[in-house]
Image: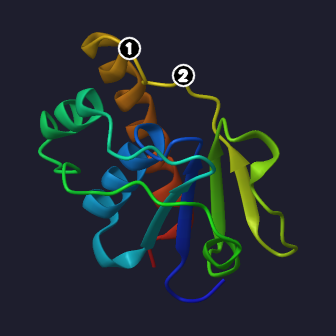
Amino acid sequence: MSTKPTVLFVCVHNAGRSQMAAGYLQALAGDRIDVLSAGSEPKDQINPVAVDAMAEEGIDIANNVPKLLTVDAVKESDVVITMGCGDACPIFPGKRYEDWQLDDPAGQAADTVRRIRDEIRGRVETLIAELTPTA
């Protein structure tokens, strides 16, 4: 892994879970980690309930745009975290892969999305600790 790792978050629509995870990683890790997110079947906009839930945390993901998962995005990443995208994510040797089992926030009430958001935050905090050990 290079000095500055790159993490790719992947979910089906790139409109909820992966966007919230990317938002947290950018906010909490700053410039110590490069962050990408993508979806195997991206929607045309971010889930507005996810946008609101992240805004409650002081993190603005409102202007993010769902992106299509590409082989290049996987190639340039050190860590690939999938969230329910099944077999759509290409596998390359030498990369760290994790599958986070998280409920899909699509169509969920705000309280459910907040619970998913809070679970994502805990996982992102653990990931940051693993990727940026203190000297």
Of all residues, the one furthest to the bottom in this rendering is 3
> On the image, which quarter does residue 89 sit in?
bottom right
Q: In terms of secondary structure, where does tag 2 sit?
A: loop
Does label 1 or label 2 sit earlier along the sequence? Answer: 2
Q: Amino acid at mark 2?
A: Asp
Which quadrant would residue 70 be assigned to in this image? Answer: bottom right
Residue at (54%, 22%) from the top-left corner? Answer: 103
Q: Position of residue 124 (x, y in %)?
A: 45, 48
- Whether residue 89 sits left or right of residue 26 in the image: it is right
Residue 94 pos. (x, y %) = 83, 75
**At 33% from the left edge and 57% from the top edge, which residue is drawn?**
65
Label 1 sits on a secondary structure element that is: loop
Badges 1 and 2: C-beta atoms under 8 Å apart?
yes
Q: Residues within 10 Å of mark 1 (few under 14, many from 20)?
A: some
The residue wearing badge 1 is 108
Res. 7 image quadrant: bottom right
